[in-house]
Amino acid sequence: MGELKRGERLQIMLSEPELVALDDWRFSKRMPSRASAIRELLKRGLLTEGFLVANSGSKSKDFGIITEPKSNGRTRGKPLG
C-alpha cells in the first residue's frame, strides 16, 4: 500500500475556547484526531465561497475560530450567514 506523505508541519496556537470548539466539532463528526479534523476543516474552507477578503496589513491575531474576522466591507463570493 502506498503511504501518504506529509512533508510539511504547521504549528498553530489556539485559545482554550477555540480548542474546545475544535474538539467539539471533531467529536461530533467522529474524526480520529485533531490533525484529521483540522485537515477536513481546511478542505471544507478552501472549497467554500463567501469568505471575507483580508484587509491589507491584517495580522494573524485578527483571525480566530470563535470570532468573525475584521472586515473592510469587501467579500468574496456570497456573504457569510
Image (cartoon, helix red, strand yellow):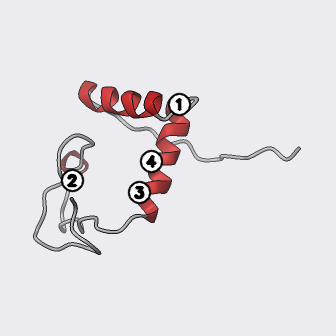
Q: Secondary structure at mark 3?
A: helix
- Mark 1 or mark 4: which comes first in sequence? 1
Gap in angstroms between the C-alphas marked 3 and 4 = 6 Å
25 to 75, vertically: above or below: above
Q: Is residue 63 above or below residue 75?
A: above
Name the secondary structure under disc 4: helix
Task: Please tell me in which quadrant of the rendered image residue 1 appears.
Answer: top right
Residue 30 is tagged as 1
Residue ID for mark 3: 45
CA separation, marks 4 and 2?
A: 21 Å
Give whichever of discs 2 and 3 has the lower sequence position: 3
The answer to the question of whether label 2 and label 3 lie on touching residues, with beta carbons closer than 8 A, is no
Locate residue 52: give its quadrant.
bottom left
Mark in the foreground, 1 or 4? 1
Helix, strand or loop status at disc 2: loop
Q: Nearer the viewer, residue 59 or 76?
A: 76
Marks 3 and 4 close (CB-CB < 8 Å)? yes
Residue labelled with disc 2 = 59
Query: What's the CA distance linking mark 1 and mark 4?
Result: 13 Å
Q: Cα distance, mark 2 to mark 3?
A: 19 Å
Q: Position of residue 41 (x, y in %)?
A: 45, 47
Q: Position of residue 47 (x, y in %)?
A: 46, 64
Looking at the rendered structure, the secondary structure element under dot 1 is loop
Tell me the quarter of the picture where residue 9 sits.
top right
The amino acid type, in three-letter code, at marker 1 is: Arg
- Which residue is depicted at the point 21% across and 68% down? 79
* For marks 4 and 2 on the same chain, the one whose residue lies earlier in the sequence: 4
Instruction: Say which residue label 4 marks.
Output: 41
Asked if marks 2 and 1 touch (Cβ < 8 Å), the reply is: no
